[in-house]
């Protein structure tokens, strides 16, 4: 059984849990180690007891750098009691630095995989700091065996033009995971009664502009449209998230949820899925293909996106969704203001008509991923390596 050491920036991140589920479903044994955003260590994640590397704070770059420096000194002793892994996966740049320290602590050749699912704005600056960050990434990734990323736009707009990584690239989209294969019949369900029309914005809530836009749009229609928020708000990005939501008559916040356990329930309560993010406008936000895109479509919620983003281009290729020319309440009103049930039925039918594998990973995808990783552990030139080629 392939033994993976998974180094992560936030052990409580739901995306970390989803990746662990995929690795285990594919037949891998996983040891989890990483930082946390909570005051106390996290006791358990998907049956694993994480090795705690300390606390970090969201949006505090200097504090996180200090935490990484401190963890680099102690990581050998923290990992000392675990068996040597076959492979190390480092989720983002700070963990890539620790992966190299961990590799030396095992005193053995352990391949490293670099998992990069977001391009931080610091990496794209043209000043000394940005160049230094890119230089550090190139140095730390000089001998990684595989780059795992989630959007072709990250490759086209960052990794290739800046020459960051020479390793092969595995495109692993942020699809919804379900153990069994899905048929079209599995996805039919009674749609929620309308009006009111409900727009769901689920996941990592970090975009203040989206929150204000949706609030103003809902006020214009005085209850004909409701905005349902669920997930984890980045409170560092909102002056008073909870106060703002409570003051808006047609916004509601349903708190966090479990993925994949709660996904069918929360998405089948809404008509539309908000798949727009201006958190890093012009950069990462225009390049990503977010989890909510796949999750919403999997359960028949019609996605709303911007036409000039990677998400918008993807939806245009699929022939589905509502694409806005501008991020304004007026543009949203023009797109949906005259919405009636017949038109919504056609929009939803197009989403449900797409191949389910467009939106979901199943166990066969998990096994393929683990086999890909296993191939990285085989010495070049061996018979096994030739068989996997």
Image: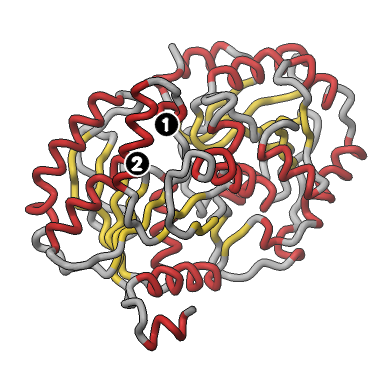
- Examine the image and state in which quarter residue 293 appears: top right
- As drawn, the label of residue 223 is none
Q: Tell me whether circle 2 and circle 1 mark residues in contact (CB < 8 Å).
A: yes
List the residue tagged with mark 1.
123
Task: Judge whether 196 appears above or below 249 on screen.
Answer: below
**Alpha-carbon span between mark 2 and mark 1:** 9 Å
Q: Earlier in the sequence, mark 2 or mark 1?
A: 1
List the residue tagged with mark 2.
137
Q: Nearer the viewer, residue 350 or 327?
A: 327
Q: Residue furthest right?
A: 342
Relative horizontal placement of residue 44, taking residue 355 as reference (left or right): left
Report the number of discs. 2
Task: Judge whether 92 appears above or below 249 on screen.
Answer: below
Please name the residue shown 47% across and 36% down the image.
119
| Residue 186 percent location from the top left of the image | 71, 64
Viewport quadrant of the N terminus: bottom left
């Amino acid at each position: 059984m392939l033994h993976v050491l998974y180094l992560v920036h936030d052990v409580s991140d739901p995306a970390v849990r989803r990746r662990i589920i995929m690795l285990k479903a594919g037949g891998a044994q996983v040891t989890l180690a990483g930082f946390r955003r909570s005051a106390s260590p996290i006791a358990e994640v998907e049956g694993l007891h994480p090795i705690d590397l300390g606390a970090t704070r969201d949006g505090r770059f200097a504090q996180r750098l200090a935490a990484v420096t401190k963890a680099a000194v102690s990581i050998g002793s923290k990992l000392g009691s675990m068996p040597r892994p076959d492979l190390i996966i480092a989720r983002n740049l700070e963990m890539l630095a620790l992966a190299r320290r961990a590799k030396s602590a095992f005193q053995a050749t352990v391949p490293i995989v670099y998992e990069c699912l977001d391009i931080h704005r610091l990496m794209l600056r043209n000043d000394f700091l940005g160049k230094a960050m890119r230089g550090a990434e190139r140095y730390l990734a000089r001998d990684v065996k595989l780059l795992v990323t989630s959007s072709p736009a990250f490759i086209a707009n960052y990794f290739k033009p800046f020459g960051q990584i020479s390793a092969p690239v595995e495109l692993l989209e942020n699809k919804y995971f379900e153990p069994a294969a899905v048929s079209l019949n599995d996805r039919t369900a009674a749609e929620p009664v309308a009006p009111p029309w409900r727009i769901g914005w689920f996941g990592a809530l970090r975009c203040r502009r989206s929150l204000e836009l949706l609030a103003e749009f809902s006020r214009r229609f005085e209850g004909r449209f409701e905005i349902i928020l669920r997930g984890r708000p980045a409170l560092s990005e909102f002056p008073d998230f909870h106060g703002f939501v409570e003051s808006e008559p047609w916004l509601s916040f349903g708190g966090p949820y479990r993925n994949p356990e709660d996904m069918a329930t929360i998405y089948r309560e809404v008509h539309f899925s908000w798949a727009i993010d201006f958190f890093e406008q012009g950069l990462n936000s225009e390049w990503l293909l977010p989890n909510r895109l796949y999750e919403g479509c999997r359960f028949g919620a019609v996605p709303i996106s911007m036409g000039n983003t990677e998400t918008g281009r993807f939806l245009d290729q699929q022939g589905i969704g509502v694409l806005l020319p501008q991020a304004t309440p007026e543009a949203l009103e023009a797109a949906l203001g005259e919405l009636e049930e017949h038109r919504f039925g056609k929009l939803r039918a197009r989403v449900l008509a797409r191949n389910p594998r467009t939106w979901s990973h199943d166990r066969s995808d998990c096994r393929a991923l683990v086999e890909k990783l296993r191939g990285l552990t085989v010495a070049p030139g061996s018979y096994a390596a030739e068989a996997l080629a």
